[in-house]
Image (tube, helix red, strand yellow):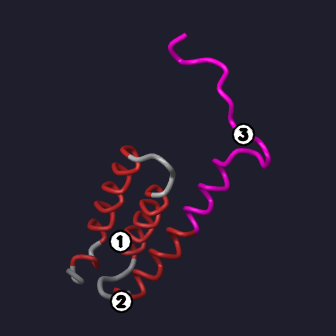
Amino acid sequence: MTAMLSIWWVWIAIAIGLAIVEILAPGFIFLGFALGAVVVGIILAITPAGSISLPVLLLIYAALSLIAWLALRHSFKAPKGQVKHFDSDIND
């Protein structure tokens, strides 16, 4: 299993899977994890094979996922003190 996580396309496949889960359960939670996996996949694609150990990859993934999640949360939140109200229905 650890050898599989050192291959770049495995991280891209994980990102695609997380993006699909995000579509099924929206909330920008899994999208942050997917963005972290994409960046780790890109890092693995451009670096020589075996140059980055698995613990370092997982640390990079965790940090990038947290940064992506915080950025998504900041960019898609409602303005402070405001609540979204819907006056009409889409079926009207």
Nearest to viewer (mark 3 / mark 2): 3
Residue stretch rendered in magenta on the structure? 67-92
Alpha carbon distance from label 1 to label 3: 43 Å
Instruction: Between residue 9 and residue 5, name the one nearer to us.
Output: 5
The image quadrant where one finds the N terminus is bottom left
Left or right: residue 41 versus residue 86 is left
The residue sitting at 47% across, 79% down in the picture is 60
Q: Which residue is mark 2?
A: 53
Q: Which residue is mark 1?
A: 45
The residue sitting at 62% across, 17% down in the picture is 88
Q: Which residue is mark 3?
A: 83
The residue sitting at 41% across, 63% down in the picture is 38
Left or right: residue 1 versus residue 51 is left
Question: Mark 3 and 2 residues: CB-CB less than 8 Å, in contact?
Answer: no
Left or right: residue 9 versus residue 88 is left
Q: Is residue 67 above or below residue 54?
A: above
Nearest to viewer (mark 1 / mark 3): 3
Of marks 3 and 2, which one's residue comes earlier in the chain? Answer: 2
The residue sitting at 72% across, 39% down in the picture is 83
